[in-house]
Image (cartoon, helix red, strand yellow):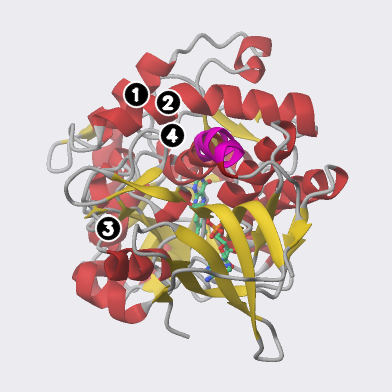
Amino acid sequence: MTPTIERVSRLHAPVHTMVAIVGGGACGMTAALMLSQLGVDCVVLERDVLPTGSTALSSGFVPAAATQAQQTQGISDSPQLFAQDIQAKAHGRASPELVQAYSEAIGPALNALAQHHGIPWQVLDTFLYPGHSVHRMHAVPEKTGAGLMMRLHNAAETAGMVVLTEAQVTTLYVNDADRILGLGFVRPDGQLEQLNCDMVLLACNGFGGNADLVSTLLPEMRDALYAGHAGNDGSAIQWGQQLGAQLADLGGYQGHGSWAVPQGALISWALMMEGAIQINALGQRFHDETQGYSEAAVHVLAQPGGVAWNVFDDRLLNFAQDFPDFCEAQAAGAVHSFADVAALAKHIGCSADALGKTLETMQEGLDPPTGRSFKRSLVAPFHTIRVTGALFHTQGGLDINVQCQVLRPNGSSFPNLLAAGGAARGVSGDAVWGYLSGNGLLSAIAGGYIAAHTAAQSAKQFASSTIRETS
Ligand SMILES: Cc1cc2nc3c(=O)[nH]c(=O)nc-3n(C[C@H](O)[C@H](O)[C@H](O)COP(=O)(O)OP(=O)(O)OC[C@H]3O[C@@H](n4cnc5c(N)ncnc54)[C@H](O)[C@@H]3O)c2cc1C
């Protein structure tokens, strides 16, 4: 179903809400929970039977600075330091206003979700993700995106939020002044239903699930596996294009260089940060793994067969087993173990000499071709996982200001259209290497939080009632 804009002067839908939220992932749910706190009625429209989105497929790790969870764990951090880290990874090419807004909002957002909606955050403090100066990756106790979504969903139920599932939004009804009067959404029986609203928040993520758009906008990922939610079909940018909205950072995305094949599972990059390496079919290393997992996707795809082998030892295996995702992948048969270099080389299909030399380089501490330095070498027995590079989600989208209002090319904002999370431009600039770990959920949660405050302010000007019958 192609997302469409229908120009109308009036819309008489059976139901009215102040804020209509398209998409029930981390962004949409965060916005809804904040709106409930602010006393503003809203409806979340979600195309799936259960709101899960890419959020439930993710590791659920959210970077945030100066949170209560960090304070409790004695970690000193600040939004300024976080903003510096984001821009350093993006080589200064991320929107400075959004970087500042998100790095400042994410702490209060996580605190509010904890205090008012019982989402318990803990800071992962056993390793640092590439590019982060301090421990600031927050997770729920399950340490999975599914756990995070489950908790957001339960909180929404407790708060009495209206989450309309099996409701795929296809149409925005817009008047001549570019004001959105309401939405049209399709139900499982094919019927189109309508809803009047004062504000719309597009929280329907990016275009990773739309092969044509990926092929056009991210040609290097044309043939890559997409590991995100299939429903992220680019609706937001298609509506934006029809409205004449500004799009930004379309070349930015989150790739991942450690997607286990054939199991189809994420192998945490924490392993690389703690000393694991990636080996190609020639028995060689081919990049500095500590630079980041996003650009690693491109490096891995450039190797023979588009694959690599993550290689690690017992100490790292024990470390990795702290991650539920890793344990699941291991249970699915992703991890293979070998007593020595010769057996590992046979498994990879490379020369034992070449692999032996690669491992010896680690002992010297520095690998000049890639610039990576090692604290220690790997010790037999060796463990390995065959991986490929995958596209996780797109970081380009509708251009927004720091209130998450969608912008026109001349910089003016649409009167009542907001976008956040993967639907809007992120804070990674316009290339794969600009993605700092966690920029995805940062944009979703900080963006949802900011958008809710903007919507609350504006919606109160347009309507005073809660959901009301209009016909
Ligand atoms: C394997 C994997 C691991 C990841 N790990 C991390 C991580 O640890 N940390 C991190 O920061 N990021 C991570 N990410 C990225 C992260 O998942 C996304 O950036 C984040 O979930 C985006 O949230 P969102 O709310 O914008 O979108 P989503 O969670 O995808 O939610 C969008 C929702 O909108 C719905 N929808 C779409 N179109 C419509 C429509 N027309 N009508 C109604 N509903 C619609 C979809 O069904 C979906 O439920 C990972 C991604 C993947 C794939």
Residue type, numbered disc 4 = Tyr
Q: Give the mark, 4 or 3, whose residue is nearer the N terminus.
A: 4
N-terminal-most mark, 2 or 1? 1
**Disc 1 vs disc 3: which is toward the camera?**
3
Give the vertical position of 386 relative to 463 (above or below).
below
Using the numbered discs, state the Cα–Cα distance from disc 2 to disc 4 in whole angstroms: 17 Å
Viewer can see residue 84: yes
Residue at 55%, 68% in the rendered image: 183
Q: Where residue 347 sits in the image (x, y, percent)?
A: 43, 71
Q: Are marks 1 and 3 in contact (CB under 8 Å)?
A: no
Q: What segment is highlighted magenta in the picture? A: 450-461
Q: Which label was assigned to residue 83?
A: 1
Q: CA distance from mark 3 to mark 2?
A: 25 Å
Which residue position holds label 3? 245
Q: Earlier in the sequence, mark 4 or mark 1?
A: 1
Q: What is the x, y in percent for residue 338?
A: 52, 60
Mark 2 and ligand 1: say if the CB distance to the nearest ligand atom is below 8 Å.
Answer: no
Precedes in sequence: disc 2 or disc 4: 2
Identify the residue position indicated by label 2 in the image: 103
24 displayed left or right of 236: right
Q: How many marks?
A: 4
**Distance in Å between CA atoms under marks 1 and 3:** 27 Å
- Magenta segment includes 168: no
Query: Label 4 to label 1, Cα distance in Å?
Result: 15 Å
